[in-house]
Amino acid sequence: MHPLIYKTTLEMERSPAWLSPGTTLDLTPLPDGAVAAFARRAARWPFRGEKRVRIGTLRAGAAEFTRPLLHAGARLRVRIVALVPAHLTPDGAARVAISVWGDARIAMSGPDES
């Protein structure tokens, strides 16, 4: 795996208190062309698996880059690399930056050619 996007910020919709650097995210393309970011959280009850919580969307440039990879089924590793909680920002909005890692050969050649 190689870094495809070293660091990009999310347009935040919600910022649960349990988010932390290193939290695994899943990216899902939306019908309107955006790419949503979902954080995984362990269920409160035993044997219930994980719950996916939508926390925001990728900015336009990052969404344009990742959308074709997601449609092609490329395996991407997405993690939170920087987090500033809402209570520490002047405008009260959380700041979350993520990194996206994957197979660089697929990203350079395009998903249609792999």
Image: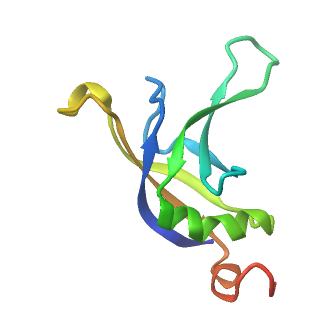
Can you give x and y, in whole percent of width and height, for residue 66 in the image? 62, 66
- Image vertical order of residue 85 relative to residue 21, above or below: above
Quadrant where the N terminus sits is bottom right
Of 98 and 93, nearer the camera is 93
Query: In the image, what residue occupies the spot 65% across and 57% down?
Result: 33
Query: In the image, what residue occupies the spot 41% across and 62% down?
Result: 7
- Image vertical order of residue 18 relative to residue 62, above or below: above
110 vs 7, left or right, is: right
Can you give x and y, in whole percent of width and height, for residue 40 in the image? 64, 35
Query: In the image, what residue occupies the spot 47% across and 57% down?
Result: 59
> Which residue reaches farthest front?
32
The quadrant where residue 112 appears: bottom right
32 vs 65, left or right, is: right
Can you give x and y, in whole percent of width and height, for residue 23 in the image? 53, 41
37 vs 83, left or right, is: right
Of 22 and 30, nearer the camera is 30
Display coloring: rainbow
> Which residue reaches farthest left?
90
- Image vertical order of residue 66 relative to residue 95, above or below: below
Of 58 and 6, nearer the camera is 58
Query: In the image, what residue occupies the spot 80% across and 19% down?
Result: 48
- Image vertical order of residue 89 relative to residue 76, above or below: above
The quadrant where residue 53 appears: top right
92 vs 41, left or right, is: left
Can you give x and y, in whole percent of width and height, for residue 6 in the image? 44, 67
Q: How many marks?
A: 0
Quadrant where the C terminus sits is bottom right
